[in-house]
Structure formats: structure tokens, C-alpha cells
Image (spheres, rainbow, N blue to C red):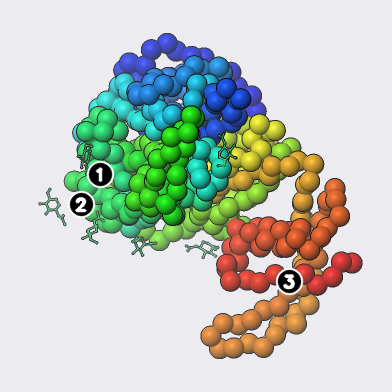
Amino acid sequence: MPLFLLLLLVGGSQATHFLGTVMTYSPRSTSDDGSLTVVVRYKMNFHLCGYSDRFSCFSGNCGTQIAFNLRLVYNESSGEWCQTEGITTLQVPSNAPFSVWLNSGNWIDNIVNGIVSWRALTLVELRNRSDTGQANRSPQTTILPALRVPSNCQRNFTLLAFDPDGDEVKCRYGNTSESECNPCTPVSVLNLSSTCTLSFSPTNTSDEGPYAVQLVMEDFPRQTIGLTQTGGVQTIVTTSDAISKIPVQFVLRVDPAVPSCTEGLYLPRFLPPTPANRAQLYTSVGQTLEISIRAEANISMISELLYSGPHNMVQITSGPGQFVLLWTPSGTEAGESHPICFVVQAVHNSTKYHSELRCVVVSVGNNPSQNITATAETPTTSPATAETTAASPLIVLQMRVRVSSSFQLTEDYINTVLMRVKDVMVSYGLPQSITLTYVKTL
Ligand SMILES: *[C@@H]1O[C@H](CO)[C@@H](O)[C@H](O)[C@H]1NC(C)=O
Ligand SMILES: *[C@@H]1O[C@H](CO)[C@@H](O)[C@H](O)[C@H]1NC(C)=O
Ligand SMILES: *[C@@H]1O[C@H](CO)[C@@H](O)[C@H](O)[C@H]1NC(C)=O
Ligand SMILES: *[C@@H]1O[C@H](CO)[C@@H](O)[C@H](O)[C@H]1NC(C)=O
Ligand SMILES: *[C@@H]1O[C@H](CO)[C@@H](O)[C@H](O)[C@H]1NC(C)=O
Ligand SMILES: *[C@@H]1O[C@H](CO)[C@@H](O)[C@H](O)[C@H]1NC(C)=O
Ligand SMILES: *[C@@H]1O[C@H](CO)[C@@H](O)[C@H](O)[C@H]1NC(C)=O
Ligand SMILES: *[C@@H]1O[C@H](CO)[C@@H](O)[C@H](O)[C@H]1NC(C)=O
């Protein structure tokens, strides 16, 4: 894929083929007069890159748009779908809640659960939280336009459900009477858990076909908090009240049965060092994050890495089933968390097969002048394999890590470095239970 691409906007959005959307928001700044700027990002999935939609105000005062950008995220190689991202900066006069929606038509044809028109609603809550002293931030997630599963296989789709304020994130189907979709018919072949896992169990061939999955993701405080509006009125929010809500909509394709559901044959299987699902990664402004993804499929042929993430992410294919995603955040992204999801697609006998869905969230360090970078050098394995108990063998490795820093390393920072090294090692497949200890500075 080229690094930069200009998109041609085709006016109007009628008679298009929609495959869902995800909307998130991030507050940016507050002025002395109480007005705020907020960045609303929305992924749009259509069959062609030239189609797009613009959200409009549904309720409250949505302010004025002061910037808008439309970017290409990913264009599926066979022309099945294209994901773009609209990035809108709104200036609102106060932090009072408002909601915006996409409301038009049509989804792709022959949706099994009967959805034709698209509608997606986002509730933007920017009131000042008593626990963080800042405007609320929405959950962060993304999705691919279409996910596939053969009708005879079991599969769980565990969506990314990350909240930058540390809230509990829950998922539910949209509610038609709340104008969250038009209509919100649930998907009969999926069981949705409130923790945002969709489980698919082997089903009848009569259930095959595309489904419109229309979810709502919400953030709930972990303890009762207050939300203060510009001017001073405070509202109490308990752990059973949602603060904000965002739409997560995509197509689930239930495909004809596959001869074997074993991962690694027809269905691609992820291999290390692919990060674990829901892994949390870190980088800082100007520093390139590298995500290595490997997969195998012994019968089908791996054809591409499908992904959704920041529009300026770059993909490198280094061999069959070997991919690297590169992303360098800019200054305006400092302090934000960006979601990335991916699926490996394989082809056999002109049938497409998907790996499981994996997503990670990338937190962008706030202070570029205080870069902490840790590069693990080839571990000098002193096979001082310690005592081995029958239940869990204990392995001790010595690792040399080079840390470059623009300031003196205090114990606090060493602990931060240790935490980050651990996160990286866990994302490479080591268990959460590993312990890292600082020994000495060489
Ligand atoms: C997207 O991919 C399709 C199919 O390969 C191609 O025809 C189309 O030109 C691509 N669009 C863009 C904007 O890259
Ligand atoms: C939010 O509240 C905190 C303390 O309650 C205050 O320090 C801060 O200035 C407030 N922020 C805004 C944007 O009103
Ligand atoms: C899928 O999720 C269900 C319930 O959430 C769980 O019981 C099952 O073990 C999971 N299956 C796989 C293959 O992870
Ligand atoms: C959907 O919204 C309506 C109106 O707010 C409410 O009465 C109803 O209980 C909601 N349905 C569900 C399933 O939550
Ligand atoms: C959903 O879960 C229920 C109860 O666990 C189970 O009986 C049903 O078969 C599941 N449905 C699907 C589509 O997985
Ligand atoms: C499969 O579908 C047929 C026809 O719709 C139905 O009669 C049958 O009960 C279904 N079987 C299962 C296991 O759901
Ligand atoms: C695929 O082939 C490789 C190399 O022959 C083998 O190690 C691996 O176990 C195979 N995968 C499956 C799922 O059979
Ligand atoms: C390839 O697909 C065709 C039609 O979809 C089917 O008849 C044939 O058996 C398939 N061949 C293999 C090797 O799977």
C-alpha cells in the first residue's frame, strides 16, 4: 500500500454498500470561556473507497466543525470492502452531553438478519469527572468491516474494549427505541457477553450468509463519581450508569463448512511473536512502533493481513504469513490510546478463510522529551535453570537490556522500564506470571 493516498469523495451516499462503522471521541482542550474541542473519529466501511458518510447532530449542542479529514485505512485486495476514517474536530460551547449519528442507507444486500438502512449513534459525554479531574473519554476500539467463520466451526470474537479512564467497558446489542440502529435485530448465531465477546457455535448450513452485527459499547465508572457541567451543576453517576456510548457495527459472514476447523490448516493460525489479543503496547511521539505478526496455514494460502488502525500505519510483508505493522504517532496523539485490530486472510479454491480476530491498544507516551526506550538484546541464556517443580518448571533467564534516556534513571523509572519490558515479553507470548527483576547497571 502506498503511504499517502488522496481519496476522491463521491457525493451522496445512496445505493452504496455499507459494512458498518465504529465511532470514538477524545477531548482535546478547554478554553477559559468553557468551550471545548473534541476529536470524533469514525471508521466507515463500504464496498468502495470512494463512498463515505458524514455524521449529523442528533441531540444537544454539537457545536461547530473546525477541521475534517478523511483518510484511507485499508482496502481489501479483492475489492470486498474498504475502510476509511473520518476525523472531525468539533468546538462545543460547553461540556454538556450531545449525540451525533450516521443515518442513511443501505447495508450490503441479502443481510440474513434483515437490516437494510444504517444508523449508528454516539453519545459524547465531556463533563468533568470527579475521579480524573478531566472530561470523560470514550472507550477505544475498532473492528474490521467483515469477519468470516465457516458454519461448522466454533469461534469467539473478543472485541477490544479499552477505556483510557480505566472504566469498565460493556457491550450490548443496540436498542431500536433509542435510535441506536434501524432496526437493531440481534444476530441469532452469536451469543454476546457483556465483556464484548461474541461466541459463534457450529450451526446449520441454512444459517449461512452475511449478518449485520450492531453493538453499542459503553463505559461504566468502577465507583460512584460526579460529572460536573460547565457552570457547576454536578450529576452523580453510579457503577450501573453508562457514561458515554459508541457504536460498533460490522458484517459477520457465516461461510460454507470447511473440511477441518483445526487452526493452521485452512483457517490461518497465529504464531509468536504475534501480540496476544487485547495486549497493551506503548510508544511515544515520534517513535515508531513495530508490531510483528506471523501466521501459518498448511492447506490454504495466506494472502493478506487485514487490519484496522490509525490511517498512517504502514504494512510490510516480509514473507508468506510474515507481516510487520509500523506506526509513528505525532505530537497531537500524545496521551491518547489508539486501537489496532487484525485478521490474517487465506485463500483455498477461491474461498477466503480468516484467522481469529486480534486487537491491541497502543498508548502514546505524553512526554516525548522523556523517552524511555528499552531494547532487549539477544538474551544471554545462562541456563541456570533453577529448581524444577513438577507442576510448573521455573526457568531463570538473564537478559541484558539497553535503556536510553534523556534523564537520570531513578528507581521509579527503572520500575517503569521493567513494567514495559514485561508488557513487551507478554505480548510476545510469555505468560503474565513472569517476574522481572533488576540486577545491576553494567
Ligand atoms: C481498492 O481496491 C480495489 C480492488 O483491488 C481497486 O479496484 C481500487 O482501485 C482500490 N481503491 C483505492 C482507493 O485504492
Ligand atoms: C475539573 O475539575 C478539577 C477538580 O475538580 C479542576 O481542577 C479542573 O480544572 C476541572 N477541569 C475543567 C476542564 O473544568
Ligand atoms: C469461547 O467463549 C466461551 C464463553 O465465553 C467459552 O466457554 C469457550 O471456551 C470459548 N472458546 C474458545 C475456543 O475460546
Ligand atoms: C430500549 O429502550 C427503551 C426506551 O428507552 C427501554 O424502555 C427499553 O427497556 C430498552 N430495551 C432494552 C432491551 O434495554
Ligand atoms: C448461546 O448460549 C446458550 C446458553 O449457553 C446456548 O444454549 C446456545 O446454543 C448459544 N447459542 C449460540 C448461537 O452460540
Ligand atoms: C437445520 O435447519 C433445518 C431447516 O431450517 C431445521 O429443520 C433443523 O432443525 C436445523 N437443525 C439444527 C441442528 O438446528
Ligand atoms: C503445519 O506444518 C508445519 C510444518 O510442517 C507443522 O509444524 C505444523 O504442525 C503444521 N500445522 C498444523 C496445524 O498441522
Ligand atoms: C473447490 O470448489 C468447488 C466448488 O466450490 C468444489 O466442487 C471442489 O470440490 C473444491 N475442491 C477442493 C479441492 O476443495
User: Nearest the camera: 132 or 399?
Assistant: 132
- The residue positioned 43% from the left and 22% from the top of the image is 62
Circle 3 packing at 10 Å, graded few (<14), some (14-19), many (20+), is few
Place residue 352 in its image quadrant: top left
Residue type pointed to by label 3: Thr
Answer with mark 1 or mark 3, whichever residue precedes in sequence. Answer: 1
Q: Looking at the picture, does residue 362 appear above or below residue 403?
A: above
* Residue 349 in sight in this render: no
Where the C terminus falls, by quadrant? bottom right
- CA distance separating discs 1 and 3: 48 Å
- CA distance separating discs 1 and 2: 14 Å
Where the N terminus falls, by quadrant? top right
Q: Of discs 1 and 2, which sits in the foreground?
A: 1
Q: Tag 1, which secondary structure?
A: loop
Q: Of discs 3 and 2, which sits in the foreground?
A: 3
Q: Residue furthest right?
A: 442
Q: Which residue is mark 2?
A: 204
Q: Which residue is mark 3?
A: 437
- The residue positioned 73% from the left and 71% from the top of the image is 437
User: Nearest the camera: 310 or 292?
Assistant: 310
CB under 8 Å between discs 3 and 2: no
- CA distance separating discs 3 and 2: 52 Å
Query: Taking the image as four quarters, which one is ligand 5 found in?
Result: bottom left
Q: Position of residue 248 (x, y in %)?
A: 39, 38
Q: Which residue is mark 1?
A: 187
User: Nearest the camera: 103 or 169?
Assistant: 169
Mark 2 Cβ inside 8 Å of ligand 6? yes
Q: Tag 2, which secondary structure?
A: loop
Instruction: Indicate which disc residue 347 carries.
Output: none
Q: Position of residue 163 (x, y in %)?
A: 50, 47
